[in-house]
Image: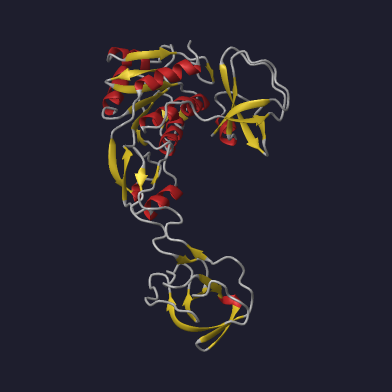
Amino acid sequence: MISVAQALDAIFALVDPLEAETVSLREASGRVLTGPVAALRDQPPFDGSAMDGYAVAAAEVEIGQVFEVVGESAAGRRFAAKVSQGQAVRIFTGAPVPEGASRIVLQEDVERAGDRITVTDRPGPNTHIRPAGGDFREGQSVAFDRPLRPVDLALLAAMGHGAVRATRRPRVAIIATGDELVAPGDRPGPDQIVASNNLGLAAMVERAGGIARLLPIARDTEAALAAAFDLARGSDLIVTIGGASVGDHDLVGKVAAARGMDRSFYKVAIRPGKPLMAGRLDGIPMIGLPGNPVSSLVCGEVFVRPAIAALLGLPKRPAGRREAPLAQALEANGPREHYMRGVFRDGTLSVAPDQDSAMLHVLAEANALVIRRPGDGPREAGDIMQFIEI
């Protein structure tokens, strides 16, 4: 067996960033830009009012001052003339500040009678004017070392862009294997269960920025597995579930080897997991996950998501870690790196008492994988531990 770190290095050696394409901002959520993007305009493009009120030409405004209202400036419709001393323009939030005006007097600080306003309260030092280019200037660039978030899309749109260059989303073929599996909604036989791992992994792939190709369940025959691998052609990554162990019905490794798979490793010192493989099949990177529900989904977090990130052009690195104190004591860990299902709440980590790799409900209740290094000794409540948010 190899370590988790060695397995990740081997997987990273199989994957490289995909080619770039131009996509509209509407389609760019979760995508990774290929480089910095420069603003095409100033934002705001003019001095704008931050409040509803009156734009006046006086730098100093005193209680009792009277101004003549000579016009109006609204968002999208400016007052075109120049404001002179003693004059005011009714103005609304976001509207361009007229030429000659130097501050906005708030509407609640004046009394209006016809076309005249009288200042009734001391305005204070704030001019309530947002300067042109106060957010960003034309030519100013931004770069993102992560998938684009909603606020990033808003920023790029404000900068004047309707489309961007981003890495193509990886197509990930997911193949669940086993005679015991039936599709969700089908009636299982007396010795069968409903396939669930493939759906969970498909959602994980899409959450990570990939496109999941959920292939039909492959039965435990060499012909069925070969047909599934044929269907996976054209993908950027193949993920198999189950059949990677050494039992008589575990045929993934055998069929892949017969097709000329260049195997990088088999078996990893991880819990849950261990019967995990990776390599290149038909020129496509492949990760073979174990079949136990928790094992496949945990290994998906540890190995598949970082692989998708690398295909998207993000740095080749493990899933992000955080640290927090334990809420309870833990026994010593065994020889494999253990990713324990737990809950991070109120600044502490609580580890679930049942860590059986078949207990999917335990993983569903968890929001953290608490990492125990191989041979890690007993832990006390309050000890700082690393974990992965899920």
Image quarter of residue 227: top left
Q: Position of residue 68 (x, y in %)?
A: 50, 84
Image quarter of residue 215: top left
- Type of colouring: secondary structure
Q: Residue at (46%, 23%) from the top-left corner?
A: 291
The answer to whether residue 52 is left or right of residue 203 is right
Q: Nearer the viewer, residue 255 or 234?
A: 234
Q: Nearer the viewer, residue 366 or 164?
A: 164
On screen, residue 91 above or below 43 = below
Q: Position of residue 70 (x, y in %)?
A: 44, 83
Q: Does residue 191 appear in this view? A: no
The answer to whether residue 375 is left or right of residue 56 is right
Q: Residue at (38%, 50%) from the top-left corner?
A: 156
Tell me how many marks there are: 0
Q: Position of residue 36 (x, y in %)?
A: 36, 41
Q: Residue at (64%, 76%) from the top-left corner?
A: 121
Q: Position of residue 369 (x, y in %)?
A: 57, 28
The answer to whether residue 109 is left or right of residue 382 is left
The answer to whether residue 161 is left or right of residue 317 is left
On screen, residue 350 above or below 270 = below
Q: Quadrant of the C terminus?
A: top right
Q: Nearer the viewer, residue 74 or 278?
A: 74
On screen, residue 127 above or below 170 = below
Q: Does residue 310 appear in this view? A: yes
On screen, residue 347 above or below 291 = below
Image quarter of residue 310: top left
